[in-house]
Amino acid sequence: NNIKRYREQLIKLGLSYDWDREIKTCSPDYYHWTQWAFLQMFKHWFNIKTQKAEPITGLIDEFNRSGNINIEAACNNFKLFTAQEWKNMTEKERQLTLLNYRIAYLADTMVNWCPVLGTVLANDEVKDGSSVRGGHSVEQKIMKQWCLRVTAYAERLLTGLEKVAWSDSLKEMQRNWIGKSDGADIWFKIKDNDRKMLIFTTRPDTIFGATFMVLAPESELVSVTLKPEFRDEVLKYLEETKKRTERERLSDIHRITGVFTGSYTINPFNGKEMPVWISDYVLAGYGTGAIMAVPAHDSRDFAFAKHFGLSVIPVIKPYNGEIPENQSHDTKEGIMINSGFINGMNVPDAIQKVIEEVKKQGIGQRKVNYRLRDAIFSRQRYWGEPFPIYFIEGIPYPLNENELPLTLPVIDKFQPASDGNPPLKQAKNWKTKQGHPLECSTMPGFAGSSAYYLRFMDPHNNKELVSKDSNNYWRNVDLYIGGTEHATGHLIYSRFWNKFLFDLGYICEDEPFMKLVNQGMILGRSNFVYRIKNTNTFVSYELTDKYDVTPINVDVNIVDNDFLDVEAFGSWNPDYKDSEFIFNKDGKYVCGSAIEKMSKSLHNIVNPDDIIEKYGTDTLRMYEMFLGPLEMSKPWDTNGIDGVHKFLRKYWRLFHVQENIFSVSDETPTGEELKALHKTIKKVQSDIENFSFNTSVSALMICVNELTDLKCNKRHILEKLNIILSPFAPHICEELWEKLGYSVSITKSSFPGYNEEYLVVETFEYPVSFNGKLRFKKELKLNLSSQDVEKAILQDERTLKWLDAKTPKKIIFVPGKIINIVV
């Protein structure tokens, strides 16, 4: 029903979609290929040496030959093993080992879990520790989830940005999201413990300034470092942290919280003991989930140290000036101090020296790290693509490709089970023919949207996602228009999905979207009614200063030019059925207004059906384009639609002697008419190519005004004008095209070219000033000599008026610019 509704609206808007290529991501015919792509990811691993995905069968062959000693893979935690040790493993042990290498893998992951909704939520579905939908409590919880190894492609996702024509700001958003950083992994001994703590740092030069360590609340080292006497306080802190999402923890930089574990680590270079703390400003997914804190040179570490009374040791002195007091000196420039063997070095040299020493002592290595996280791919809900996975003794195995699509079963209850299990857990016979249980979670929304553009190329192919012939023809998306909200979600996932399929040879292009334009948001014009406090009486906007009122958002669809439809207001909300009104002096109720984001909660959503019913589709289309530049956010104001509607009526009248009596002439057009047309063709053609639709509409309006003043109804002019207007207002132009005698649609006609000959300017309207003050304008031919210009000006009646019988001292004439008479 939802799809049917959207399709009706898209058709009503006259949008030129090829409905033969319509795809529905909820259809088994479509998600067959989403499941197929997931199986390919399950059957492949990422080889760091070749920087591409390769079959897991090749990895098994290598394990049989040499173990994993020679393997460089993007993978989870693993230990080295020999070929013999691999051969001695049980089937279960082998499958668990391979699961660490697969691009689609199952692992324990920290998620946003909502017990009431019974599902994992994405970060943008959580606000202030509660679900956006329903306001239910959300906690951080470790759950076994399917993940996609997006991080394996981090470097290629970065370098690929150089190939595409995207805005610099959008590229920068992706670069920041991927978050590449060079540094080192360093091992720190934990005092009185056999375990060590691994940290990743981009600033190994500051290791002598490290005064404490901080663990992410989710780190496995919390249990390792926790001393019994601190247990209650730590557990209480961990429970509180569960209520905050990672996004909230990162963004709330002024909130300082933490708890001491009771343990210490040993600085490998100076032997100093450093207390181990836990704080939610450290994330488990970035680096190793543990940091060495250098408060003298990191603002967040500094704030933490000051709050808890921890020591601060400066290790970098600025080239010019003193070390600042009572604040951190966040810098990558200066001379090392208080730093042992790197004293006196500049920062870049010190970084390299410490990395060399770390490697030499066998306590770490050089490391490139990325902020990008693997995508959590499981959802504990019914609506979603089923995973083509079954389990034997808790180990996942793939279905055969000939068993796809695995379709959703018919069930009675769509909510999760009382024990938190997904709805599919309650489905009868949700198992393979052999009786093995199938995966009960389903895929997230972005599963279906990651490769839709590939299916568009070959939507009816029931043998493959897209044929090589179709893909070689279409290749990739020439132009993508979408909002910046997709920058760190959909666009990342689609690029990852595309690169994976490219590695396997199924598609011919490494990047999916070549040119990308971000359209601005359409802002809503909200309206307000004003209720006198503690009453059900509403006062008109002009009278609000006389009463104590509360503004209330009202449905903009019952407001016309800020005048409220009082009867409709009572029907709109039962609470206001018996409302009383204090009207203005004209007996009307005037609403207040503001420009806000279009939102159901603000009641400022404009239904296109209502606009179309009142003004027609062409008016709606042209008004949307006339609002402003494509990339800018623009306020919607229904009051402005009238102007566009009047323009279209004026355009209609060019073809009619009366309202509906069609009349065009076959006479030869004049030079002025040709000039008006051809400058418009040139302008509109250029504007369309540059997505400047608002200025195209302006140019068309100017042209229609000029042709109206010239009383032009010449076929030669109007036919071409009709073609260039048709992409903006297709319905009125199609009707006029038929009236012009054509039986084939205007969409089949060629866009007209412009002739520069008609654009040659022969005259100029000169501003005529007296002693520097503009008094009037006069149009003169550009080829006139200065003597002819002076003669023409002095003979003008307006000149005689302003001279007032005086003789001009001088006449300043600048061809094509100004005329100034000095009196």
Image (cartoon, helix red, strand yellow):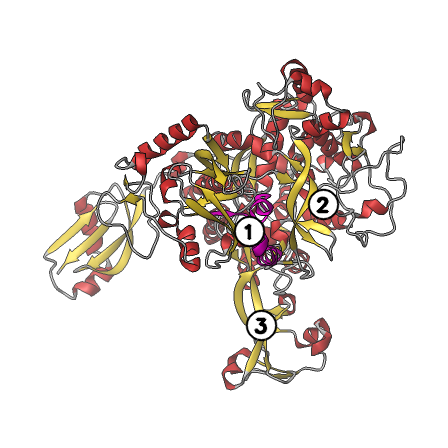
Mark sitting earlier along the chain (1/2): 1
Q: Position of residue 160 (x, y in %)?
A: 50, 30
Q: Residues within 10 Å of mark 3 (few under 14, many from 20)?
A: many
Which quadrant, please, contains the C terminus? bottom left
Q: Nearer the viewer, mark 3 or mark 2?
A: 2
Mark sitting earlier along the chain (1/3): 1
Q: Residues within 10 Å of mark 2 (few under 14, many from 20)?
A: many
Q: Is residue 807 above or below residue 400?
A: below
The Cα atoms of the two marked residues, 1 and 3, are separated by 34 Å
Quadrant in the picture for residue 307:
bottom left
Q: Which residue is mark 2?
A: 379
Q: Which mark is residue 528?
A: 3
Task: Examine the structure image and report whether residue 315 is included in the region drawn in magenta.
Answer: no
Say what amino acid the circle numbered 1 marks: Arg
Q: Residues within 10 Å of mark 1 (few under 14, many from 20)?
A: few
**In the image, which residues are magenta?**
213-240
The Cα atoms of the two marked residues, 1 and 2, are separated by 19 Å
Instruction: Say what secondary structure mark 1 lies in.
Output: helix
Q: Position of residue 808 (x, y in %)?
A: 12, 58
Do we see residue 657 in this rendering? no
Quadrant in the picture for residue 15:
top right
Residue 448 relative to residue 750: left or right: right
Q: Is residue 145 above or below residue 498?
A: below
Q: Which residue is mark 1?
A: 247
